[in-house]
Image (spheres, helix red, strand yellow):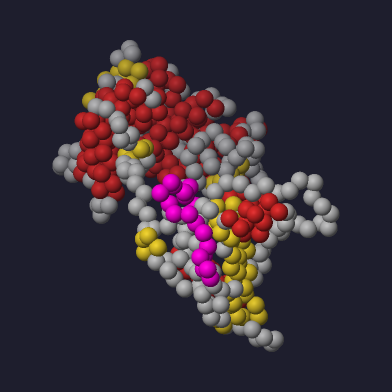
Amino acid sequence: MTQAAVSELDERVPGRRWTVRLDAAGRGSTAVRISCSRPACAEQRLPSAAAGRAAAVAHIKAHLRSVPAPRATAYCACRLADCHTHLPDTGRPRTEPWRCGGPVVLAVVTDREGRWWQVMECCSRCAAATPGAKTAATSQPPTAADPPATAPAGGTAPAAGAGTGAPQFSDDDHGLVPVPRAAPARRRPPQVKVAQRVIPHDLRPVVLRDELIELGNLFRAYQQRDQPDLELLADLQERKARAFTSWADVTSEGPLRWEARRAEQAAATARLQDQQRTGGITGGDGTAVTRLLTVPAQWEHARSVLAYVADHTPLPGPDARLLVLMLTLRTAHTGTGNLVGQDLTALGLTDPQDLVEKLTGCGWLSLPGTAGDLLASRPENATPITVPSLAPREDGTGPFTFGKKMRPKLSGWAQKVISDKKLRKAKATAATRLLALTLAAQTDASGRLGPGGQGIALTALAAWVPADPGELQQLVDQLTEADWLTDAALTDTHLTGQLTERVLPLTCPLRA
């Protein structure tokens, strides 16, 4: 050690250092013993290495809780040991001496095997350079009012900035000496959030900040409710939409305006669900309508399948459209599914075998056997089918966004519509059943046709149901006779009417 280093050491207090070790208690036993380099700490014996490590860590933590803050005037304990923890001894002189620097810290170092733990009072630069070292505390810079930190005879100098009543280790007798306590640090005001966003403490106007704080509290209180209250939730979402719009106007932050639009959509959805579940949408006897598909997401997915089939049916005509629709719903998630002959004969198709052969011939459908084998198959020996265009792509995506649990719900909804008892009794054609499916997905919440109950444009209807304008009136009449449609009126531009009360549970309302 150089003369300058010795001189500096004479003027500064040596940094503290102590070690806790974990060793085997003896041969042929799993017991371990814990020893601490401080003589005041008694040896401990534990039955296993796991228990020993837990006890050793607890012992180190107890030392760290009782030791005062690192002393700003302490000499780096790592440098006293020639920095061997991070500068390995190569046997050759170093080209440049290690330079300590930064505030004094309490660093905890352990080996990878968990056999020893060492705490040392060193400079922050040495702590950062030591592999695996963790800083437990950092010293505060000394002030002019602090007394000089000199080591008393047989003891350790008091820590700079240590507070009243904080215990401090003595390096010789290892007792605890009370020292003055520093004034507690000022705490920042707690953060207040709404929708995971921090409300700035200086947000103006104050009435807006108060509204956001109250909304955050109301949403958190709602989450603690045992039962949902959709009307209350809709009110909260509407208040949130207004408040976030005002917030966006004040700060010009685009994401806030986007969040306001989401809140508006959530409010509309909650109100629709509340009407559906609590009687806001009722039948003639005043009871609430319970739909087969219960939430707006399912209604949108049903319409997405109908739209996809309208654009991707490989053969013309309503029979092919209905068959492709039902096969798509059977195989939508993976491109594969199972089918029996009754699934085809129940669709009211003119020649199902010919249609299946044409679909397999053009490559849209793949079967392990013939179309006749499929029509003859029964539930105990269902036929596996494959629709290659619906199989997931290399990135795992497909033409639809719903998952495997949603697919059978949509398929069950479509099967319920086309196998309606009165449609079967009337021997409704495939075109009539396809129109029934389309109308069920194109009503308002009360069952009136079209957005807002204003009717369905014939141009849009023609894209969903491949029928000539002259045939459309016949299809409407068949649905009216089957007690599916009432008050129907077909003009040059629109089809208006109301679905009957008995089929309201099968409807998928359009968004208001």
Q: Is 360 in front, or is 429? A: 360
User: Does residue 316 belong to the magenta stretch?
Assistant: no
Q: Is 143 in front, or is 343? A: 143
Is residue 420 among the parts visible in the rendering? no
Horizontal relation, residue 83 to residue 72: left or right: right
Q: How many marks?
A: 0
Q: Is 510 in front, or is 482? A: 510
In the rendering, at what x and y percent does residue 135 appear? 55, 55
Residue 249 lies in quadrant = top left
- Seen at 39% across and 66% down, the residue is 178
In the rendering, at what x and y percent does residue 218 appear? 24, 43
415 up-or-down from 31: above or below: above
- Seen at 46% across and 28% down, the residue is 307
In the rendering, at what x and y percent does residue 115 appear? 64, 70
- Seen at 50% across and 29% down, the residue is 308
131 up-or-down from 273: above or below: below
User: Does residue 141 belong to the magenta stretch?
Assistant: yes
For the stretch drawn in magenta, the main secondary structure is loop
Q: Is 31 in front, or is 5? A: 5
| Quadrant, the N terminus | bottom right
Horizontal relation, residue 272 to residue 407: left or right: left
Horizontal relation, residue 490 to residue 345: left or right: left
Residue stretch in magenta: 138-156
493 up-or-down from 24: above or below: above
| Quadrant, the C terminus | top left
